[in-house]
Image (cartoon, grey):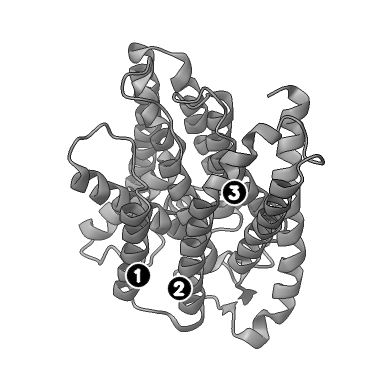
Amino acid sequence: MTLQQTIWFLLTTLIPSCLITWGSAFIIRRRAASWGLLDHPAERKVHSKVTPLGGGLAVWLGVLSPFVIGSVLLWVASEESGWIPSFAQPHLAGLKDQLTGLWMLLGAGTILMVLGLVDDLRNISWQSRIVVQLLVASTCVIWQDWRLTLFLEWQPITWFLSVLWIVGLVNSFNMLDNMDGLSGGVAAIAGSTLAAVLLLNPDPATQQPQMFVAGVLLVLVGGLLGFLWHNRPPARIFLGDAGSYFVGFCIASCTLLATFTSYRGPQPHAVLAPLCVLAVPIYDTVTVIWIRLRQGNSPFQADKNHFSHRLVELGFSRSQAVLTIYLTTLCCGFAALLLHRVDAIGALLIVLLVVCLLALVAIIESTARRQLRQ
């Protein structure tokens, strides 16, 4: 795409969802108390006043609405396409073919959003939440054949790892939602980076930018940007489980729908791009579970052992902790952008840099925490 086409694509994907989410959040903030969508201060939480939940509902509306309108317009365009920009016309047939997958993604994401919304209202047991997440993820992976690109011949192991990837990321973004602007900001950075990877590096089979998956990610990013205006410190509304489940599922599913490389292509190592982009949420989840198990607690028991909490414990302000995590996510995302530009040795070095960055963070954290407790 030319620069002008790229700008047009970015504006049409980012702005509608951003504005819808931004406007919806005002309404939800005012109605949250009557709906019972309130988050009260507690020992394991960092906020000190009652704050509305429902930010996830606003993000969901911001993402769903443009696709409802877009699907109608696509149907109209199939009858008369003269008003469609010339660069987009060759993609109309492909977009129409993708509608089933799009609405499968949005439908499954909606189920998880509703699950999270009910949990925000009534506190569902973690066992029930995991069962529903597994059922939704398994349906998408097996029925729609959404799978990680792993170059493995045995299909069941690919299915298993793909389901684990979806459920893991859904809960990773849920765990990351513990400070103002954190989960939504990290998701916006990750979604933007993944979209950039797909637009800058063509599909190995078609040699065309992957506009469909990139577009889905950018619509999600637009919704997150609209939400973050309300969620910036001090937050006037929280994402809630409804939002973190929806966002985590959309990002995880898009990584399965995208094609990052081919088995016989010149850069098979580009398959590691999603792992680099999402290294920070994965790091947070793995380290939190490790700390909980080491303390003899359930891995599903909420506490203040998250990456952000650990930074605050070291003397960071909450805003500094969030900004540090943003920058770490950006560094890992830049690594993913480089994977398509290097050979196998270069890819190994890039992955090692990401590992070393996170290892350095872990060493600094653990050493400083031990000194504080002595």
Q: Is residue 157 above or below residue 123?
A: above
Q: CA distance from mark 2 to mark 3?
A: 22 Å
Task: Give left or right: position of 103 versus 371.
Answer: right
Q: Secondary structure at mark 1?
A: helix
Label 1 sits on residue: 132
Q: Residues within 10 Å of mark 1 (few under 14, many from 20)?
A: some
Q: Tag 1: residue type?
A: Val
Residue on which disc 3 sits:
185
Q: Are marks 2 and 1 in contact (CB under 8 Å)?
A: yes
- Left/right of residue 12 with respect to residue 188 in the rendered view: right
Q: Can residue 374 be seen from the camera position used here?
A: no
For the point 59% across and 65% down, the residue is: 56
Marks 1 and 3: in contact by CB < 8 Å? no
Please state which amino acid type lies under the numbered disc 3: Gly
Task: Find out whether the residues at labels 2 and 3 contact each other: C-beta distance under 8 Å.
Answer: no
> Measuring 52% from the left and 74% from the top, which residue is drawn there?
117
Query: Could you say where residue 327 lies in the image, as x and y percent from the top left?
Result: 55, 36
SS of the residue at dot 3? helix
Residue, far right: 83
Q: Quadrant of residue 21?
A: bottom right
User: Which marked residue is nearer to the observer: mark 2 or mark 3?
Assistant: 2
Mark 3 vs mark 1: in front: 1
Residue most extreme to the front: 79
- The residue closer to the viewer here, 157 or 303, is 157
Q: Earlier in the sequence, mark 2 or mark 3?
A: 2
Can you tell which mark lies on residue 359?
Answer: none
- In the picture, measured across the screen, residue 362 lies left or right of residue 240, that is left
Q: In the drawing, what numbered circle is on residue 115?
A: 2
Q: Nearer the viewer, residue 263 or 127?
A: 263
